[in-house]
């Protein structure tokens, strides 16, 4: 929900919110309107600039209200609200514009299209524009109406979410998040998010967690699936994520590693933050229009695989996952999960996944796009080739581990202290790591007291 004037001035701009000066032209205002409609919707407040309320002149209000009609094609679905704010004894008008996530591709009247990514409105190339148009069908599916009423949904979950948003009523909350269509009908997204058991309508909208005893799943009599380790998680999407995450925590292979307290602790072979991002992304961004398959999380002794129905959205190159811009196949589901803290607004999930794996010194995540699904593989193998790793001394390995865990440049003395070795031993270990290209030295001169080492 939008806040008062003070709140609007301090609210961080991001995926769902932007401020614009009251002097903006209708043509320029059309750009964020198009970008938000092509992404997950949001709100634009016109009349706020540089931490101050500059307001909208009464003579300009109508032209700004008509920006979508005059400068976007097809016209972006947007609602308007004028608010009067007292500033220094004077009344100023701000225009609150609420953009709905759209089921069609929108552009400016000159054919240029934009997509909201974090706090930016990014211009799309001709190829990206065409691919986004192809992918609109999946986004339309979550907004399609169902033969359900609000009373058919889980009132406890609805009430908790409405309360968290500060909505006056459940119906107001559903309308605010576009979970009811224009005729007040419950959408597919509302059912998946707030039905106690949406599997009555969508039997394959489940997460299935399996653990195998071997690195090869095997077939028939040779199948390595462990007894009782094939578990299905149903219920609303947030409940599926919570239940599956708790089970994966228990089933994830662990090893004993020296913890920060100086004692050995059971540590998951795959970092929790990495596989949790993969699980959340699979649930939030899968194609729910594909009825014949479910999400599978397969746990092996040396890896975890997460397979999700639906190919990557058209704007995505699976060969370059770190270059993926934020794009939600299910913008309504994504918005609610962001409100609930399940996902983050800035589309940083994939980058965070890579970062967590690299901090542990593990190989990068691997994405594979198949005919009707996407598979993510997180492997518990060291990113450093074994032939190099086997040549390192124990002190060099200890230093490498310190640099991975701290994830920041450190001086020789700091590394020696954290690794529990002498400075001379640390110097020899660092020389070996530099010779094999694993670390780099950064300083002004050979005797620079502020020189540091960091991972390459």
Image: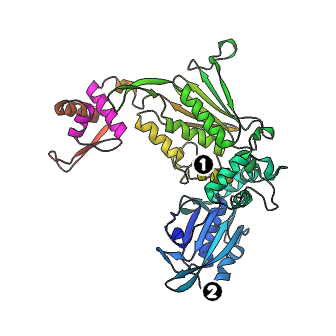
- The one nearer the camera, 176 or 117, is 176
Q: Is residue 417 visible?
A: yes
Viewport quadrant of the C terminus: top left
Q: Where is residue 394 in the image (x, y as percent from the top left)?
A: 28, 24
Q: Where is residue 1 in the image (x, y as percent from the top left)?
A: 62, 63
> How are the residues colored?
rainbow
Within 10 Å of the Cα at label 2, are there few (<14), some (14-19), or many (20+) other Cα atoms? few
Using residue 437 as the reference point, say whether residue 314 is left or right of it.
right
Q: Where is residue 12 in the image (x, y as percent from the top left)?
A: 50, 63
- Tell me if residue 221 comes above or below residue 434 in the rendering: above
Label 1: which secondary element: loop
Using residue 217 as the reference point, say whether residue 451 is left or right of it.
left
Main secondary structure found in the magenta portion: helix
Query: Residue, x 20% and y 39% (percent of image)?
Result: 413
- The one nearer the camera, 312 or 24, is 24
Tag 2 residue: 58
Of all residues, the one furthest to the right in this rendering is 147
Tag 1 residue: 316
Q: Can residue 328 be seen in this view?
A: no
Q: Give the range drawn in magenta.
A: 390-419
Report the Cα–Cα distance between label 2 and label 1. 43 Å
Of all residues, the one furthest to the left in this rendering is 447
Using residue 413 as the reference point, say whether residue 177 is left or right of it.
right
Tell me, yes or no, whether the highlighted magenta stretch contains residue 113: no
Looking at the image, tell me whether mark 2 or mark 1 is earlier in sequence order.
Answer: 2
Label 2: which secondary element: helix
Query: Residue, x 58% and y 26% (percent of image)?
Result: 299
Q: Where is residue 79 in the image (x, y as percent from the top left)?
A: 70, 70
The image's mark for residue 104 is none
- Tell me if residue 193 comes above or below residue 375 in the rendering: below
């Amino acid at each position: 929900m939008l806040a008062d004037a003070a709140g609007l001035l301090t609210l961080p701009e991001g995926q769902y919110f932007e401020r614009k000066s009251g002097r903006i032209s209708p043509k320029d205002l059309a750009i964020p309107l198009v970008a938000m409609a092509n992404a997950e919707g949001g709100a634009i407040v016109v009349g706020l600039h540089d931490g101050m309320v500059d307001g909208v002149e009464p003579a300009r209000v109508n032209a700004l209200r008509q920006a979508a009609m005059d400068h976007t094609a097809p016209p972006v679905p947007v609602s308007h609200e004028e608010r009067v704010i007292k500033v220094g004894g004077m009344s100023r008008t701000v225009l609150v514009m609420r953009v709905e996530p759209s089921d069609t591709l929108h552009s400016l009247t000159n054919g240029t299209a934009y997509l909201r990514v974090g706090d930016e409105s990014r211009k799309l190339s001709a190829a990206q524009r065409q691919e986004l148009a192809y992918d609109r069908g999946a986004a339309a599916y979550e907004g399609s109406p169902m033969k359900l009423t609000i009373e058919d949904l889980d009132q406890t979950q609805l009430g908790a979410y409405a309360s968290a948003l500060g909505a006056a009523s459940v119906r107001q909350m559903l309308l605010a998040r576009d979970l009811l269509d224009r005729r007040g009908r419950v959408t597919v997204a509302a059912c998946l998010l707030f039905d106690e058991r949406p599997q009555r309508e969508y039997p394959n909208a489940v997460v299935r967690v399996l653990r195998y005893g071997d690195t090869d799943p095997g077939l028939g009599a040779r199948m390595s699936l462990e007894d009782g380790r094939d578990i299905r998680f149903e219920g609303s999407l947030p409940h599926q994520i919570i239940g599956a995450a708790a089970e994966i925590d228990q089933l994830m292979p662990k090893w004993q590693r020296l913890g920060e307290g100086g004692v050995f602790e059971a540590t998951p072979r795959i970092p929790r933050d990495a596989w949790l991002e993969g699980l959340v992304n699979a649930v939030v961004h899968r194609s729910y229009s594909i009825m014949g398959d479910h999400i599978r999380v397969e746990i092996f002794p040396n890896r975890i695989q997460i397979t999700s129905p639906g190919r990557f959205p058209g704007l995505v190159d699976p060969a370059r996952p770190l270059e993926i811009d934020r794009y939600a196949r299910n913008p309504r589901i994504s918005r609610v999960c962001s409100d609930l803290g399940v996902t983050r607004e800035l589309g940083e999930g994939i980058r965070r996944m890579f970062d967590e794996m690299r901090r542990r010194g593990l190989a990068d995540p691997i994405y594979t796009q198949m005919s009707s699904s996407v598979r993510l593989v997180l492997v518990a193998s060291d990113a450093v080739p074994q032939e190099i790793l086997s040549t390192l001394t124990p002190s060099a390995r200890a230093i490498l581990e310190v640099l991975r865990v701290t994830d920041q440049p450190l001086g020789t003395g700091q590394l020696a202290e954290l690794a529990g070795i002498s400075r001379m031993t640390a110097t020899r270990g660092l020389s070996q790591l530099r010779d094999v290209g694993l670390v780099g030295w950064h300083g002004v001169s050979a005797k620079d007291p502020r020189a540091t080492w960091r991972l390459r």
